Each structure stands twice: as C-alpha cells, then as structure tokens.
Image (cartoon, rainbow, N blue to C red):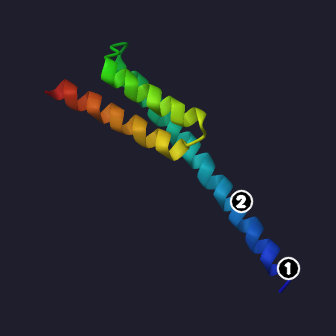
Amino acid sequence: MKLRLPLVLLTLLAAGSTWASNDRRECKEELQKLKEAFNVDYTSQNHHGYREAKASRDNEEYRKCAGQARKARERIERDRDV
C-alpha cells in the first residue's frame, strides 16, 4: 500500500510532462503555420494575434498559445477568401 501511492504520483507526473510536451509542440507548429500564412503581409489585426500567441508561449501557456495562433491563422485565411 505504501509503495502504490508514490508509484501513482510518479505515473501522473510522467503523464503531465508528456501532455506539456505535446502542448509545446502544437504551439510551435501553429505559430509556424501562422507565420507562413502572413506571407510577410502583417496587417495590424493579424500581427496582434501573432504577438498574443507568442506572449502566451513566452508565459509557458502552450495550450492557449496554440489556440490563439490557430484562430489568428483561420481569420487570415477567411479574410483572404472574401
């Protein structure tokens, strides 16, 4: 019984680390896609979305970073279609 609790805690810690790694990777990928979507055409609104996503990354809020970058990229693509 005494051995189970530390084992469970170590397992949860390892799983949390894996999830954080996935969030960091997803953030990096979404920022790269967003940067490619700009095509060096930084409009004030889109540039603002990129800066927000980068700030979230710098604050180690990787899941939030990925979401912000994805939304900004989708907004760019939607504006181009119109």
Q: Is residue 69 left or right of residue 74?
A: right
Which of the two residues, 66 or 44, is positioned nearer the viewer here? Answer: 44
Q: Picture coordinates of residue 5 (x, y %)?
A: 79, 77
Sort mark 1 into few (<14), some (14-19) or many (20+) by Cα contacts within 10 Å.
Answer: few
Residue 3 higher or lower than 47, as above or below: below
**Residue 42 is drawn in which quadrant?**
top left
The residue furthest right is 2
- Residue at the disc numbered 1: 3
Label 1: element kind: loop
Q: Amino acid at mark 2?
A: Ala
Residue at position x 39%, y 29% in the image: 49
Residue at position x 30%, y 35% in the image: 74
Sort mark 2 into few (<14), some (14-19) or many (20+) by Cα contacts within 10 Å.
Answer: few
Q: Amino acid at mark 1?
A: Leu
Residue at position x 56%, y 41% in the image: 25
Q: Picture coordinates of residue 27 (x, y %)?
A: 51, 38
Q: Quadrant of the C terminus?
A: top left
Residue 51 higher or lower than 29, as above or below: above
**Residue 14 is drawn in which quadrant?**
bottom right
Q: Is residue 17 left or right of residue 31?
A: right
Residue at position x 74%, y 73% in the image: 8
Which of the two residues, 1 or 47, is positioned nearer the viewer here? Answer: 47
Q: Picture coordinates of residue 46 (x, y %)?
A: 34, 24
> Quick one: label 1 or label 2, which is nearer the N terminus?
1
Q: Quadrant of the N terminus?
A: bottom right
